[in-house]
Image (cartoon, rainbow, N blue to C red):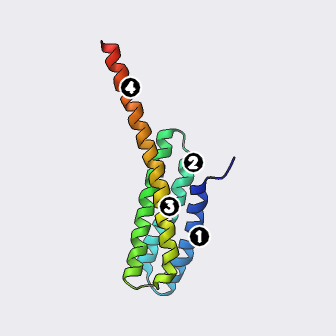
Amino acid sequence: MAESIVKKKSYDFALKIIKLCAMLRNQKHFEISSQLLRSGTSIGANVEEALAGRSRKDFFAKMSIASKEARETNYWLRLIIDAEILDKQKCSSLLKASEELIKILTSIVKSGCDEQQEVSRKTKNSKLRTQN
């Protein structure tokens, strides 16, 4: 079985976030480092949980959380850049990686929502036919 692309990308991303947070801590930016570390590593953790989910609903719920964590991480990275805490060059590749993760995870979650709506529509139609 091929390894999940989102699993690999989120894990690699978490490793880079850990290194960036160590740099932030060395510069005494403890609070923002903690926030970034929590959200940036949570993406991969939730992807791992999703891949081990017991149901499709569980899978999409965990992927949705991972998507939200990716957006939060993107926020912290933009804040670090705009506040000039770190050089933009040091964060730009991570910012792009977070945007890529957001796109991948949003696509996964959206496909689950579309699927859920289709099932719901079919269920309503079959109930209507049964009532007639």
Task: Work out whether residue 36 or residue 7 is closer to the camera in this orientation and state it.
Answer: 7
Give the image location of residue 48, x and y in percent: 57, 53
Q: Determine the CA span between mark 1 and mark 3.
A: 14 Å
Q: Residue at x 38, y 25 (%)?
A: 123
According to the image, label 1 marks what residue? 15
Residue 51's disc is 2
Q: Determine the CA span between mark 2 and mark 1.
A: 19 Å
Task: Work out whether residue 22 or residue 114 is closer to the camera in this orientation and state it.
Answer: 114
Residue 35's quadrant in the figure?
bottom left
Q: Nearer the viewer, mark 2 or mark 3?
A: 3
According to the image, label 3 marks what residue? 101
Could you tell me the amino acid type at mark 1?
A: Leu
Q: Earlier in the sequence, mark 2 or mark 3?
A: 2
Image side of residue 40 versus residue 72, left or right = right
Q: Residue at x 52, y 74 (%)?
A: 93
Give the image location of residue 24, x and y in percent: 48, 82
Could you tell me the amino acid type at mark 2?
A: Leu
Residue 123's disc is 4
Mark 2 surroundings: few (<14), some (14-19) or many (≥20) residues within 10 A: some
Task: Work out whether residue 80 or residue 41 is closer to the camera in this orientation and state it.
Answer: 80
Give the image location of residue 21, x and y in percent: 51, 77
Task: Work out whether residue 72 or residue 131 is closer to the camera in this orientation and state it.
Answer: 131
